[in-house]
Image (cartoon, helix red, strand yellow):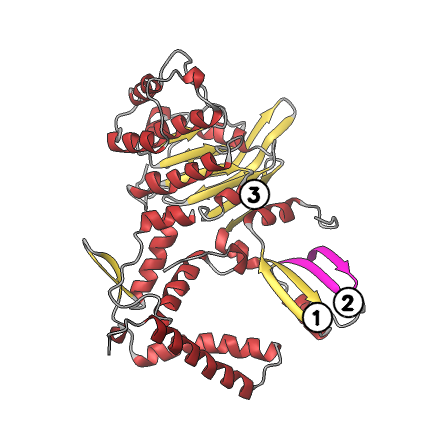
Amino acid sequence: MSPDAPAIAINHLIRRFGHTDAVDGLSLRVEPGRCYGFFGRNGAGKTTTIKCLLNLLRPTGGSVEVFGMNPAKHEVKVKTRLSYVPDQVGFYPWMTVRDTLEYARSFRSHWNEETQRSLVDRFRMDLTQKTSHLSKGQRTQLALVAAIAPEPDLLVLDEPTSGLDPIVRREFIQTVIGAYQEGAPGKRTVFVSTHLISEFEGLIDEFTIIDAGKAVLTMEADAARQRFQKVYARFASEPTEFALDGARSVRRRGRELEFVVTGGSDDLMSRLAAASPETIETEALSLEEIFVTTLTPKGAVA
Amino acid sequence: MVIALNFKSGKPVYLQVVDQVKAAVASGAARAGDPLPSIRPLAEELRINRNTIAKAYTELENQGVIETSAGRGSVIADQHNSPLRKDARVKLLTEDVDEAVIQAHHLQVDKDEFLRLAADRFESFARRRARTAPALKD
């Protein structure tokens, strides 16, 4: 419960369903104030992990801590400091938008009226509408207002933008950046699980890629974009074979050669330069391309 | 001042913001006293983390490119008042020149061509500043 405890600390988390290990020894750490991406394919173990944070599931092994507290022991204290937006939001169908916000508010010790009002305006929400009549996008917007108005220290988003149209998605992300981060930017922590990675490219400080319940890559976003580079070279004539050790996703088309390097590639780049190509161009991979490259078997062509 | 980000450049996002503000000052697109966009609208517009912009502005302030005062927000600083000493400024620039020299070597651009190019670029920025300067000034 120390004030500088990480927002989230997951240590060797295991969660088994029958004989299946949905989460299999996952560790990660999210410092307060960061925006942390949690990327994985469907079934990689993202939602199971998040449910352990919220005490909706008990870990089979290992531990999870939110602000230094075990969610199973301090459920109320943990839940007053975080908000959660799942991909499928359930509301009571007989309640109006206003009722739903008031109901959500009744569980909270703190609620920013002004934030609620400005978001309701921004999303052009009708407070008198029954939640059963809301579209998928409107339901997500309502869940977001209810999540942000209490000004929690941690916002947990589980596939928040899947199934939304591009305009609603854009508004969603702008709201997270603007309305949520504005109040106390050093303290507002975002933990977002998604496979629509490009949407969140600019928001992510650091990320973990999870596959089959294990962390396969944890990096700062800027460092990852510096390390994962696509290299394109064109030669005057078809090049003689040279060793492409360490290169991924290699493609050859006559005089042209393209491959991906994933760091520590100085030797490879000097071998390439020694073959005197006409041009060498490099560009950083996006986080989404890094995700695909990381989860593509080494020999395969992405 | 228009800031456009390119995630494909591999350059850290906050540094892209820093470099673009500095380029705007060098080319005359932004002048001393001009306000910088507030953090929140700029972050929303670019859809990047608010903390990234804050980090860029802090860096610009440390380098003496902008000044921030309570109430007035951030403005472009008077460039003759860099808080860094001349030798510190030259040292910062040396690192960038070294990178360009290395790049020139790999692209088979020799010293004479490189110096000619540098002179051309100085001219080009001077012309852009002259074009954007107010007509009645000087």
- The residue tagged 1 is A271
Amino acid carrying label 3: it is: Ile
N-terminal label among 1 and 2? 2
Residue A260 painted magenta: yes
- The residue tagged 2 is A242
Residue A246 visible to the viewer? no
Subunit under mark 3: A
N-terminal label among 2 and 3? 3
Q: Is A99 placed left or right of A261 in the picture?
A: left
Q: Is the residue under label 2 in contact with that under label 1 (CB below 8 Å)?
A: yes
Disc 1, SS: helix
At which x and y percent is residue A5? 36, 41
At which x and y percent is residue B16? 44, 60
Q: Is A255 placed left or right of B135 in the picture?
A: right
Q: Which residues are magenta?
A: A245-261
Residue at 36 percent of width and 60 percent of height = B1
Asked if residue A233 is positioned above or below residue A199 in the image, the reply reads below
Asked if residue B138 is positioned above or below residue A20 in the image, the reply reads below
